Amino acid sequence: PCRALAPTIEELAKEYAGKVFVGKLDVDENPLTSEKFNVSSIPTVVILKDCCEVEKIIGLCNKQRYIDALMKHMT
């Protein structure tokens, strides 16, 4: 699922460049960060606004689900 999500994340990063930061994090290489955000299943997408978690999407979803979440928090 993480590998299947990677192209979507890369597309979102390009489409929303300059508006939001979209990135990937390897939980195996960054255990403290994944622990900080209580990531217990992968893939997990964490949306932050003003340095605070505002939404967490667990599991593989279609691209529109991620777009809807981003748009909801971009105001």
Image (cartoon, helix red, strand yellow):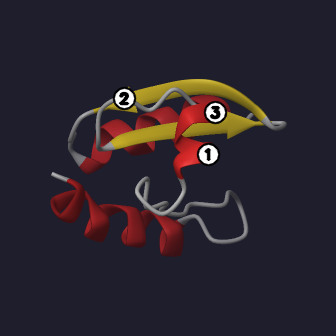
Q: Cα distance, mark 2 to mark 1? A: 12 Å
Q: Amino acid at mark 1?
A: Thr
User: Residue 74: where, in percent of width, then height?
Assistant: 69, 39
* Crowd tier of the residue under label 3, counting other residues whose Cα lies within 10 Å: few below 14, some 14–19, many 20 or above: few
The residue labelled by disc 3 is: 36
* Crowd tier of the residue under label 2, counting other residues whose Cα lies within 10 Å: few below 14, some 14–19, many 20 or above: few
Q: Amino acid at mark 3?
A: Lys
Whether the residues at callouts 1 and 3 have beta carbons within 8 Å, the answer is: yes
Front residue of this view, candidates 56 and 33 = 33
Q: Amino acid at mark 2?
A: Ser
Image quadrant where residue 10 sits: bottom left
User: Residue 62: where, in percent of width, then height?
Assistant: 21, 44
Is 13 placed above or below 36 here?
Answer: below
**Is residue 45 shown to the viewer in this render?**
yes
Whether the residues at callouts 2 and 1 have beta carbons within 8 Å, the answer is: no
Horizontal relation, residue 54 to residue 40: left or right? right
Q: Cα distance, mark 1 to mark 3? A: 5 Å
The residue labelled by disc 2 is: 40
